[in-house]
Structure formats: C-alpha cells, structure tokens
Image (cartoon, grey):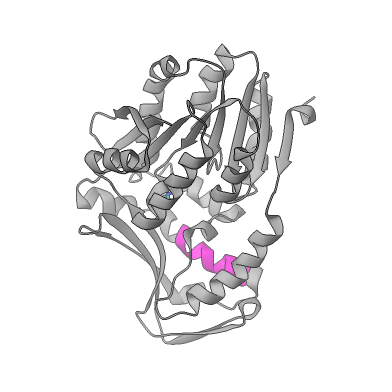
Amino acid sequence: VVDSRLQYFKPHATKIEKTFAEEISSTLGSNSKSIHPKFFYDNKGSELFKQICSVSEYYPTRTEISILQKLQTELPPFLDEDFRLVELGSGSSVKTRLILDFFTSSQKNTEYFPIDISEILTESSEELLNDYKNLTITGIIDTYEGGLEFLKTYDDKKNLIIFLGSSFGNFSPIDGYKFLEKVYSTMKPGDLFLIGLDLVKDKTILESAYNDSEGITAKFNLNVLSRINDELDADFDLKNFSHYAIYNEKDQRIEMYLKSLADQSIVVSKSDLELKLQKDELIHTEYSHKYRLSQIHDLLDDVGFELKHTWLDDKKHFSLTLVSK
Ligand code: AVJ
C-alpha cells in the first residue's frame, strides 16, 4: 500500500558523485581552501545536524517551529485552491509535519515533493507515509537546482514551495540572488514560496549557536573530513584539526572553518590531490548569512516576487516570509 504512494527520482545521480571528487580537487586545491557545505550531509552529517537542531544554544530550529505553529492557522487563508507542497532541503522533514498537518486535514489527497541531496529523504518519507494516510510522496534526490528543473516540467497543479531553516544563508549574496531567480522562473503565476531566514542579532547569541558547549557543531564540521576520507580515499587525521566559527559583523554572516593544528600534508587519492597545510591555516566550510527584514523584503522584491506576509517570533530572532509570483 505504501509503495504505490511513494516514488523517487534521482535525475542527476551519477553527476552528483563525480562532482564530489572534482569539486574537492578544485576547492581544496586552490589558494583559499574550502569545502562546500552541501558536502556536510552524508548520513552521519545529517544525523549530526539533527542533533544540532536540539542543542540549547542553537535557537533557529525551535524558533522557526514556534513561528510555524502560528502558520497552522495563518497560512491556510493564502491557499485558495489545492496546492502541492514542495520542499527544498527537506532533510528529516520534522518541521514539514507542521504544514502537512493542515494540508492533509483539509485535502482529500496531499502531494508532497521533498527535494534533498541526502538519502535521508528515503527514511523520512517512509515515516511520513505511515503517519499520514492520505499523503503521496515524490522524492527528488538531487541539488536544489536539479529538483527545481524537474518540477518545472511536471504539471499544472499549484505549488507551495518551502525553503526552511535559513538554509538560504549558505549562499553568497550573488549566488543567493541567482538561486531566487531560479525559484522564480520555476514557479507558475499563483504559486507561493515560503522562506525561513535567520535575522541579525547580538553577536554572542550568534556565536554560541555555532559553538555549542556539547561540541556537536564541532563534530558536524569535522565529519566532512571523515566523509572525504571514506569516499575519496583521503588520509585526514581528524585530531589535527579543530572547529572554528566566528561572526563577521560587516558581512552579516557566521563563518565556519576547520583549523589545521600542525604543518601537515594530506593525500586525497580520488581527487588526485596532495594538500599541504600550515599550522593555523584555515579551510573554509560554511557561511551562514543573517538578514535584516528590510534586506529580505528588498531582495525578494528585486527578484520580482510579490510580498504576501512576514511572520516573526516574539524576540525577532527568525523570520518566515511568504511571496507569490
Ligand atoms: C542548515 C545552513 C541553516 O547555517 O545554521 C548549523 C547549518 N551549520 N550549525 C546554519 C549549520 C552549523 C545551518 N543551515
């Protein structure tokens, strides 16, 4: 029964795997060494991220959940007809449930299209099908861009596309703008887009969120090196690296790095790379941009979206903004 309600597409499977070795070769092989944050999310990394979401210092998840609880009654008035729910970066789909609750209770059959680069999608989809009887899922295992390309050609049903958790914050301003243009061009008139963005706030709150006292964020950051060891035949010794995260006020972003604790040399076989690192040298792994409300509104407006509503929590720590095409 469950099988007929579940299908997967992996439009660019082989390309994803090839890209990992190639991308690591070019980004770790360059002068300013970096690893793209999308590579955090192997099974272990996705699990560690789930743990980050419940450490006390990491306010974004619980804050966004509190806002989503308000949306359970405040979003339906914006949904005039049958919408399909599309989610970019669905991960473990925990927050999605807050939206699926009212979709499935008001629709005869709810369609959910999660798009995620991680195979964790398959686990969360099966759990959702068990809990929601009138749900069908089309899981798309791909990058955001690949998933959006797939959606564009799908059908005429209206889409509510959600992009939660401030995942957008990973993009540089230029890439973020291009990404929003991509979302906009995928949408049909009347489609809706809901985006969750973390807001600028006190530096100490921000820095503690990315330097939790349990050290889960550190494990999450270091795990990308284990992944490179396993999948690209590399010999990173994790003891020779430490987690480093600071808030850059000028650029409004948390910057995360792996710091080399010694002069060392690492071989990444499948990337054909011999990496030399000096003591204290940094490998950049993530930017997490924070926004002011006016910047969010200007950005979405510039892309061409029509602003519908912005919801905030009481402390104004996090935002959810709904726009249409
Ligand atoms: C998933 C990108 C939203 O930037 O807060 C959490 C990832 N990195 N702790 C974020 C993350 C370290 C997270 N995003």
Please name whichever residue, 192 or 126, is drawn nearer the observer in this view of the structure. Answer: 192
Q: Which residue is depicted at the point 64% across and 38% down?
A: 153
Question: What range is drawn magenta here?
Answer: 219-230
The count of marks equals: 0
> x%, y% of residue 1?
80, 24
Residue occupying the point 42% across, 87% down? 263
Q: Is residue 211 visible?
A: no
Q: Can residue 217 be seen?
A: yes
Prevailing secondary structure of the magenta residues: helix
Magenta span includes 221: yes
In the displayed structure, does residue 217 sit left or right of residue 120?
Answer: left
Residue 207 lies within the magenta run = no
Q: Quadrant of residue 34?
A: bottom left
Q: Nearer the viewer, residue 320 or 177?
A: 177
Q: State which quarter of the image contains the C terminus.
A: top left
226 lies above or below 292: below
- Judging depth in this view, the residue of 255 and 8 nearest the camera is 8
Q: Position of residue 60 (x, y in %)?
A: 36, 41
Q: In percent of the image, x 36 and y 79: which residue is there?
A: 281
Vertical order, 110 against 220 (above or below): above
Could you tell me residue 302's position as x and y percent?
32, 43
Residue 54: quarter of image: top left
Residue 130, how many percent across, how many down? 68, 26
